[in-house]
Amino acid sequence: MSSSFVDFYASMHGGHAVTPTGLGYVPIVVEQSGRGERSYDIYSRLLRDRVIFLVGPVNDHSANLVVAQLLFLESENPEKDISLYINSPGGSVYAGLAMYDTMQFVKPEVSTLCTGMAASMGAFLLAAGHKGKRYALPNSRIMIHQPSGGAQGQASDIQIQAKEILSLRESLNQILANNTGQSVEQIALDTERDRFMSAAEAVGYGLIDRVFTHRSDDE
């Protein structure tokens, strides 16, 4: 996530910095069963319906949670789809790749849905859903750009870090090309700077397959 985009994202959120935060108050739902009442936090209840949320920055903590939930749902039923809802400004490339690799590793098909924003690694993960099952709500915003990072230390260390970030960019561009149908050269050109898209534009680009306005009976 580039520093310029961090500043932009913060300004759109009342000046708050982009830092990993809790979700604050989490609603509790109560269900009746033959054994009496049972309460769940809302996210645990939705996990039973095979829905996973990636909300906020992509970092080691959010990646570990998503990876664990993917593996758990695979163990519960390796044949049934998993839904990943994304509202994220992006973040760590390495954490994002951990989620990406696990999405490809598990047997269930992983459907992705953007609610709000999918930027940087958030957009990368949105496009990584199973082909034909990548969605966005109509007012979602999707943004792609090249990876960024700061290097410091002696000249040889900076050279090593620069080589690594260029290698990461090449890998990310290749994956995005495979997932969108765009050429690697076009991806490299379009990610040179921040490239924002509407949900409809993201369909045309190949990042997603469909814009959802209402839930249909077959979803």
Image (cartoon, helix red, strand yellow):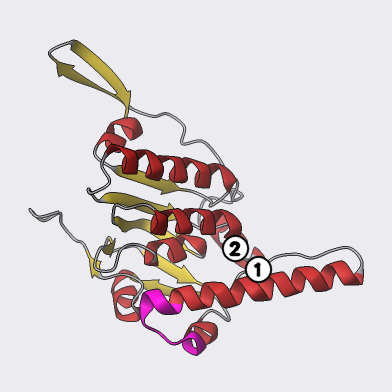
Q: Residue furthest left?
A: 217
The residue tagged 2 is 1
The answer for how far apart the CA atoms under marks 2 and 1 are is 6 Å
Q: Is residue 219 left or right of residue 46?
A: left
- The stretch in magenta equals 177-186
> Which residue occupies the foreground of this view, 216 or 19?
216
**Label 1 crowd bin: few (<14), some (14–19), many (20+), radius 10 Å:** some
Percent from the top left, x then y, of residue 164?
70, 70
- Of label 2 and label 1, which has the lower sequence position? 2
Which quarter shows the N terminus?
bottom right
Percent from the top left, x then y, of residue 99?
47, 53
Q: Is residue 55 left or right of residue 167?
A: left
Q: Which mark is residue 87?
A: none
Q: Is residue 47 left or right of residue 144?
A: left
Q: Is residue 42 magenta?
A: no
Q: Is residue 182 magenta?
A: yes
The amino acid on which the numbered mark 1 sits, given as a three-letter code, is Ser
The residue tagged 1 is 148
- Tell whether label 1 touches label 2 (CB within 8 Å): yes
Look at the numbered disc 1 and give the secondary structure of its residue. loop
